[in-house]
Image (cartoon, rainbow, N blue to C red):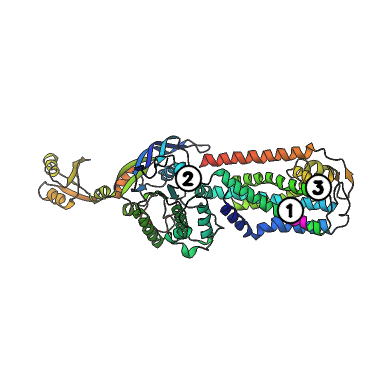
């Protein structure tokens, strides 16, 4: 029975663990207990620093690896079944193409493995490959190879598209074009789950951001919730009489949190100017400090690791996760 | 089986002229030099002449070069991520193996066809049974060396290593009594080398196991179990090595 079309949940992950035991060293839990559900039609970013376990998690989601414990269901079935039925496909990290084939041969070869697939020419058109059809894969740039992987992922006309660091190795233009193409696919109603270590990509493209660190989900929120977090300011000052000051500040609607930290009064607020003025003019505050409590800071606090800076071409290719042992 | 996949595999191999040279060109040329034009190649053995005997050796060399290269190439391409890409398709492992096996068989048949044709056009003579049976043994036996290529590819994960392995087949061919008839201590060593059993079995339809030196002096005949045991043991060694290396690769994923 094909439940794919009616099953409401694209991804159900429960109690998932994946432990690697590299030769001669201690076991490493690349995925250390993850629960995650993704509804049909959602666009979800899996955000985390290198080694957070994103690639391993996506491998388990695609049936490329076996979990040590826990379950993964894609549209209600085991991942390998979902792959065979063409309901899920993926753009994997670098590697995985035959360098001596042409672009078109690669698409035709992978298409031939599916009983039913989208027309080869149409897929190549959508991935922007039509003019590269006769080029050898070895002669394609990193961005072109990534577009080829994207074309291969479109072949089964999947309901769920998984992208693992899809813009790694792309220049700024290629990156923008790639996300434009992805926007089109998402608009067709596909569920999209993508891993990235670029905050900007997660913010720009996803409706929901799942943050991972050390094999666990450390935060899971809609992008707008997280954006609001980014707009908050942390205002701190020394005050002679903390108690009445805290009382006044907590009464303000724009203040989400107020308290004493290391002998300083500290306030989290969406209206830093008002709080600062109040502290200096009326509450006898001194040594005032206003800081942005941005998403970046939240991320560092939650994951214990800084994110990559803005995407750029000099970013080294993230291959350390592909083997899993380093995760 | 995917005919599209098979066709594209064959196209890939046709694009690699170096590979085809070692698989078809070199055995053909070696036969013309050593088998077609030298004195004494028309001397008759049990079921065919010396030219036929040399021809079978050259065809065998070409066939194992093909299977080693294809087996090794499969291991290397899978370890470099193509296995992950195929893991995103409905293609099953056994279908992939089937495509590679048919490819290896077709490519291994090329040197057999070419060298046997050269033999027929020049000096090789023998019974129909000797021609046909030797060709079958060359092809079937060559499959063992796909395991050799596979093991090397799994162990080193580079195309270069597979090329070196294919190159080593030249040395192994000399050691295995395949190119030049050995005698004395060298022949004793040869009996334990990987290509000895394969070559001896392929020539058995011509010689019935009779042995001779490069000058044509007869030696004691090999009982059938010697080459059979040699080929079985080496196939087992290659097979176990390949399985162990596949397991190691899995554990690392």
Q: Position of residue B72 (x, y in %)?
A: 62, 49
Quarter-wise, where is residue A201 in the image?
Answer: bottom left
Q: Position of residue B179 (x, y in %)?
A: 79, 51
Q: Position of residue B58 (x, y in %)?
A: 76, 53
Q: Chain of mark 2?
A: A
- Look at the numbered disc 2 and give the secondary structure of its residue: helix
Where residue A278 sits: x, y (%)? 12, 49
Horizontal side of residue A260 vs A202, given as left or right: left
Secondary structure under badge 1?
helix
Residue A171: in sight, yes or no?
yes
Circles 3 and 1 on the same chain: yes
Residue under pointer 2: A84
Marked residue chain, label 1: B
**Residue stretch in magenta:** B113-117
Write down the residue under mark 1: B112
Within-10-Å neighbours for mark 2: few <14, some 14–19, many 20+? many
């Amino acid at each position: 029975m094909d439940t794919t079309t009616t099953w409401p949940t694209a991804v159900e992950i429960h109690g998932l663990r994946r432990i690697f035991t590299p030769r001669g060293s201690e076991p490493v839990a690349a995925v250390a207990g993850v629960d995650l559900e993704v509804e049909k039609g959602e666009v979800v970013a899996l955000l985390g620093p290198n080694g957070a376990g994103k690639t391993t998690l996506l491998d388990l989601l695609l049936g490329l690896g076996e979990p040590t414990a826990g379950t993964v269901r894609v549209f209600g079935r085991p991942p390998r079944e979902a792959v065979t039925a063409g309901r899920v496909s993926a753009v994997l990290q670098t590697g995985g193409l035959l360098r001596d084939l042409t672009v078109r041969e690669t698409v035709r070869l992978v298409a031939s493995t599916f009983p039913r697939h989208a027309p080869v020419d149409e897929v190549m058109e959508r991935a922007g490959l039509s003019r590269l059809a006769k080029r050898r894969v070895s002669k394609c740039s990193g961005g072109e190879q990534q577009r080829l992987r994207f074309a291969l992922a479109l072949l089964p006309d999947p309901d769920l598209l998984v992208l693992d660091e899809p813009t790694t190795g792309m220049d700024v233009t290629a990156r923008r074009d790639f996300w434009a193409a992805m926007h089109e696919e998402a608009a067709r109603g596909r569920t999209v789950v993508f891993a990235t270590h670029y905050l900007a990509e997660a913010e720009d493209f996803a409706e929901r951001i799942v943050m991972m660190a050390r094999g666990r989900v450390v935060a899971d929120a809609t992008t707008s919730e997280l954006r609001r977090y980014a707009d908050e300011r942390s205002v701190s000052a020394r005050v002679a009489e903390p108690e009445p000051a805290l009382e006044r500040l907590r009464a303000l609607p724009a203040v989400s949190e107020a308290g004493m930290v290391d002998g300083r009064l500290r306030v989290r607020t969406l209206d830093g100017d008002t709080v600062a003025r109040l502290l200096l003019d009326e509450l006898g505050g001194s040594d005032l400090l206003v800081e942005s409590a941005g998403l970046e800071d939240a991320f560092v606090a939650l994951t214990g690791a800084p994110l990559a800076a803005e995407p750029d071409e000099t970013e080294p290719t993230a291959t350390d996760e592909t083997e899993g042992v380093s995760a | 089986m995917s005919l599209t996949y098979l066709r594209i595999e064959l196209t890939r191999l046709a694009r690699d002229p170096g590979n085809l040279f070692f698989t078809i060109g070199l055995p053909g040329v070696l036969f013309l030099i050593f088998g077609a034009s030298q004195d004494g190649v028309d001397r008759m053995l049990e079921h065919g002449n010396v030219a036929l005997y040399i021809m079978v050796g050259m065809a065998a060399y070409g066939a194992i070069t093909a299977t080693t290269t294809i087996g090794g190439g499969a291991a290397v391409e899978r370890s470099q991520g193509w296995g992950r890409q195929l893991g995103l398709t409905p293609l099953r492992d056994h279908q992939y193996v089937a495509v590679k096996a048919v490819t290896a068989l077709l490519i291994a048949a090329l040197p057999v066809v070419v060298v046997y044709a050269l033999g027929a056009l020049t000096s090789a003579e023998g019974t129909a049974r000797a021609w046909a049976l030797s060709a079958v043994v060359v092809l079937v036996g060559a499959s063992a060396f796909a395991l050799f290529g596979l093991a090397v590819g799994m162990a080193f994960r580079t195309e270069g290593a597979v090329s070196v392995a294919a190159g080593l087949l030249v040395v192994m061919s000399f050691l295995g009594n395949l190119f030049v008839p050995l005698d004395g201590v060298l022949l004793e060593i040869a009996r334990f080398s990987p290509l000895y059993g394969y070559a001896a079995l392929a020539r058995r339809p011509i010689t019935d196991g009779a042995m001779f030196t490069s000058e044509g002096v007869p030696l004691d005949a090999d009982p059938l179990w010697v080459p059979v045991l040699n080929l079985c043991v080496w196939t087992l060694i290659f097979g176990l090595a390949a399985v162990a290396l596949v397991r190691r690769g899995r554990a690392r994923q």
